[in-house]
Image (spheres, helix red, strand yellow):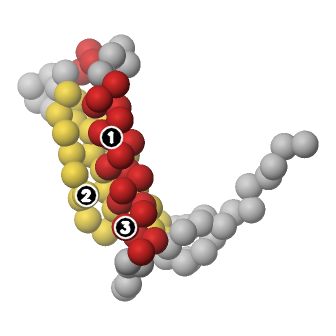
Amino acid sequence: MAETDDSMRSIAGVVCSLRDLPNGQLRLVLDDVANESKSTVGPWAHRIVFTWKDFAAQEIEDLTLSEAELAAFGHSVLARLIAYRKHPVSK
């Protein structure tokens, strides 16, 4: 039996996006967001740019990032989410 989504969320999260740069690269941007409902699925509001990194577009499109780069990305996201659990955002 498949588990269903209970629609409960944390008060903070990280949004990932890709942005085209004029030099042909892609910028991976991580933004901190706050859940305005404090418990359900949103709405989410932008808080601050957490970090970003530029990549060759082909690396992203072909999914050929190194294991180390992928691990660093995952580590950054997870570390940020853990930090929010220990130090919740306030409005």
Q: Quadrant of residue 74?
A: top left
Q: Quadrant of residue 39?
A: bottom right
Marks 3/1: CA distance? 16 Å
Q: Position of residue 26 (x, y in %)?
A: 22, 30
The residue sitting at the left extreme is 23
The answer to whether residue 59 is visible is yes
What amino acid is found at the position of numbered circle 3 in the picture? Ala
Marks 3/2: CA distance? 12 Å
Q: Are marks 3 and 2 in contact (CB under 8 Å)?
A: no
Q: Are marks 1 and 2 in contact (CB under 8 Å)?
A: no
Q: Using the image, determine if residue 26 lies above or below residue 90.
A: above
Tag 1 residue: 73
Q: Which mark is residue 36?
A: none
The residue sitting at the bottom extreme is 91
Secondary element type, mark 1: helix
What amino acid is found at the position of numbered circle 2 in the picture? Phe
Tag 3 residue: 83
Q: Residue at x 79, y 52 (%)?
A: 4
Q: Position of residue 37 (x, y in %)?
A: 56, 77
First in sequence: mark 3 vs mark 2: 2
Q: Residue at x 22, y 52 (%)?
A: 51
Tag 2 residue: 50
First in sequence: mark 1 vs mark 2: 2
Secondary element type, mark 2: strand
Marks 1/2: CA distance? 12 Å
